[in-house]
Image: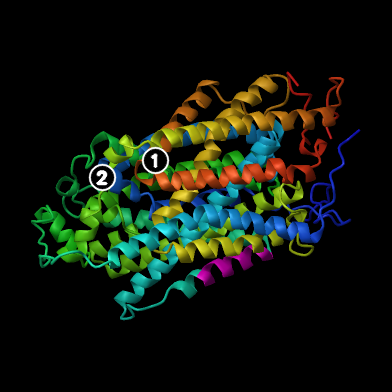
Amino acid sequence: MTTTTTTEGKAGGGAQHISLRKVLGPVHVWALGVGIVLVGEFTGWNFSLAKGGAWGALIACWYIGLLYTCVAMIDSEVTSTVAAAGGQYTQAKHIIGPLMAFNVGLYLVMAYTMLEASNAIVVGDLLKSFAGETGYPDLDVKPFIVLTIAVLAWLNYRGVYATLTVNFVITAIAFASIIVLFFSVSPASPGKVLLHRELFTDLPYGWIGAIGALQFGMWYYLGIEGTCQAAEEVRSAGRSIPLGTMSGMITLLVAASLTWYVASGLMPWQYLGQAYTPLYDAAKLTGGGALQAIMFIGTLFAALASANGCINDASRSWFSMGRDRYMPEWFGAVHPRYRTPYRAILFLIPIAVVFALLFYTRLDLVIGFSILSGLLGYTFMSFNMMRFRKLWPLGSIHRGYVHPFHPWTAIILLLLCTTVYFATYLGYSDMLLSIMAFYIAASVWFAFHRYKYVKRGDQFTMPWPRPKGY
Amino acid sequence: MAYQPPKQGGAGQIVDSLLILVLLFLCLLLPFELKKKFAEEAAAAPAAGEQAPVKEPTWTDLGQNATQVQQWEKLGKTPADAKGLIETEFDFDKDLRSGWLWITIAVIVGYFFLLLRISDREYREVIAERFGNDGRSGDGR
């Protein structure tokens, strides 16, 4: 589909105005959302077992499922009304203000870039495991980690349509591998392959451990809200985004349930709580070479699809901030030929590479940075929803969707987020304070230096009436 | 009259880009790199006095039942390999007793409080410039 030019896609301060290409449909939105998150079923969620054991991980799966239901309800209302690139960042600009928008933009960039780094680590560990089994135990995986990030960045540089079409194919294969694994372990015959009764223990740290497990329960679903990043590149935002997001959530709920059931019935919780590639390990335990090969491909494709989607989303947030001068204007450029935010894509590569290489042995930390950035974003969403209804009460503007139970959804979301901050504090307090230090320092930099470059009136572009009370 | 922001030159843009990278690495990398360095130094330091020979662990010592042992072995792990994984423990009581809990709460609450206050002040500037000071509606730009 050909594109129209608009005044939105100002290329790095130049005279030519180029827009992002509107080529995506619901399938691509599903691929973007599920592609980013599905790797969370292959690795990451299992770190919740280290704190809460198998039962703690299941409680986390359900509890955090409720948190994401609130996120999905709120996001459906706000995104269907503010359909523009930048997702929650653009929403924050219109509803709360520039400093919050700057922070939300950073949350998105950090959540996706750290997720990208963790995916590269998973690819490296998977290759190391495979090399060990085929007689090359000393394989240096660092070049493969760098290569993974570089190749996917190049794919993103060349064009969003090809990027997300590739994502659709490899995400579908990765999801199919989970289904194959599930039916390979005789799920209807407990005790035959799956050994839940013998492997399960009580909560290893009691209920406080179950609360602590909520932190990594986020990994089952983290990133699904990234579908709204594609708002400016879909042919029909009103149809594609809700359809792609809702089908994506259903896919993830099914995959999360199957994953927990299979993995917790095969491995002791102490092993599972620290494994980098638990589903690949699950395949090894069933003894089938073919299944092991399928799970190798599934894990590899899930990690690649996720990293691919992360580069797409992180670069669009960075691009949007550059376009609005929240970051240097140079980043707000669209490639004249490929119509991609190429400078943002290139700038974020070294961040992902450095974190992937330095934290290769601490996957839980890289995942933790990503989770916390996502959590800060969900906390923002509860404030955002409250203000959205207050500044523009129902009937004052056209909404694509009105979610029920307001304000309870926003209040419950805030309470659930508070519990997850506490869960993160349990065992990872240094990480929590480190990431808060970063956002506080960045906020001071924005408020006292960067904000002077921002054109005030340009921060509000929606065709809405003046907000109530302002 | 609308606010006219200054034009930022190329050098200023490079400095700003590098600054955000420095902030990121300082806050997220440095504490953990230092912690790792101190931990390695502590592990390398010679222990005072004569150490008792380390006893080879058994699955019974590690509290594993027959099924758990079977799965560990299928995963290619010996008791010595599994010891580190099994004995890694969180000390949640220490976390709860620590004064850092209250500092962390204050940091998160203070961060959001200031974020909302400063954003509100900036938002008023945006709305005043976008809609003017006379309360008229937007034009659907």
Magenta region, residue range: A146-158
Q: Which mark is residue A45?
A: none
Q: Position of residue A366 (x, y in %)?
A: 45, 55
Q: Main secondary structure of the magenta part?
A: helix
Q: Which mark is residue A53?
A: 2
Q: Residue lying farthest bottom? A: A135
Q: Residue at x 84, y 20 (%)?
A: B135
Q: Quadrant of the C terminus of chain A?
A: top right
Query: Is residue B5 rendered to the left or right of residue B93?
Result: right
Image quadrant where residue A312 sits: bottom right
Q: Earlier in the sequence, mark 2 or mark 1?
A: 2
Within 10 angstroms of label 1, few (less than 14), some, or many (20 or more) residues? many
In depth, the one of A184 and A271 nearer the eye is: A271
Query: Tag 1, which chain?
Result: A
What's the CA distance linking mark 2 and mark 1? 18 Å
Return the residue at label 1: A425
Q: Would residue A407 be counted in the magenta stretch?
A: no
Q: Is residue A332 above or below residue A429?
A: below
Q: Would residue A152 be counted in the magenta stretch?
A: yes
Q: Name the amino acid type tagged 2.
A: Gly
Q: Position of residue A270 (x, y in %)?
A: 24, 53
